[in-house]
Amino acid sequence: MNMKNLDREYDPMQTTQMRDGAKHVLTGIVVGGLIGATAMLFLAPRSGEEMRAEVRDKAAALRDRTAETMKDTVSQVKSKADELTGGVKGKAQGLKHKGQDLLVEKLDRASEAVEAAKKAIQEF
């Protein structure tokens, strides 16, 4: 496998873009939830105390949902990052072993050539 393929398969920029994309999605969920909850609360006919209680309940539910979404997003990003780095490490090890095997093969051929040259010189 050549290095061009390795570069194409692991791109640190891709990991950064994935992480930034997750942040944007999470921000959109939080902002959308806040706007929707606020609009619902203020457009519904209720007394002040009922509204405050509902605001408290909705805020707690939104906080819990946001925390859960954050955990899921962080878990997914970590999993993908581990997957990418694990793949790169495996490919690097494979390339290392392939290079070592190639070096041993070339050294064996060189040794054989030297021995053949010595033999030819002795026969001459």
Image (cartoon, rainbow, N blue to C red):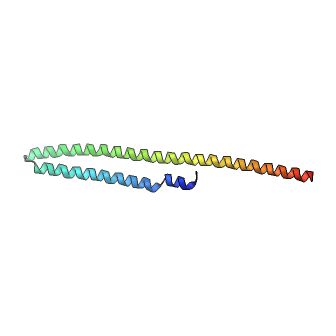
Comparing 72 with 101, the one in front is 101
Above or below: residue 75 compared with residue 35? above
Comparing 100 with 47, the one in front is 100
Residue 105, position in %: x, y?
71, 47
Q: In this view, does 107 lie to the left or right of 39?
A: right
Q: In this view, does 27 lie to the left or right of 56?
A: right
Residue at the location (31% across, 52% down)?
A: 25
Q: How many labels does the image show?
A: 0
Residue 100, position in %: x, y?
66, 48
Q: Which residue lies furthest to the right in this view?
A: 124
Comparing 31 with 110, the one in front is 110
Residue at the location (54% across, 47% down)?
A: 89
Residue at the location (43% across, 46% down)?
A: 80
Residue at the location (18% across, 43% down)?
A: 57
Quadrant (top left/top right/bottom left/bottom right) for the C terminus: bottom right
Residue 60, position in %: x, y?
22, 43
Comparing 82 with 115, the one in front is 115
Q: Is residue 114 left or right of residue 57?
A: right
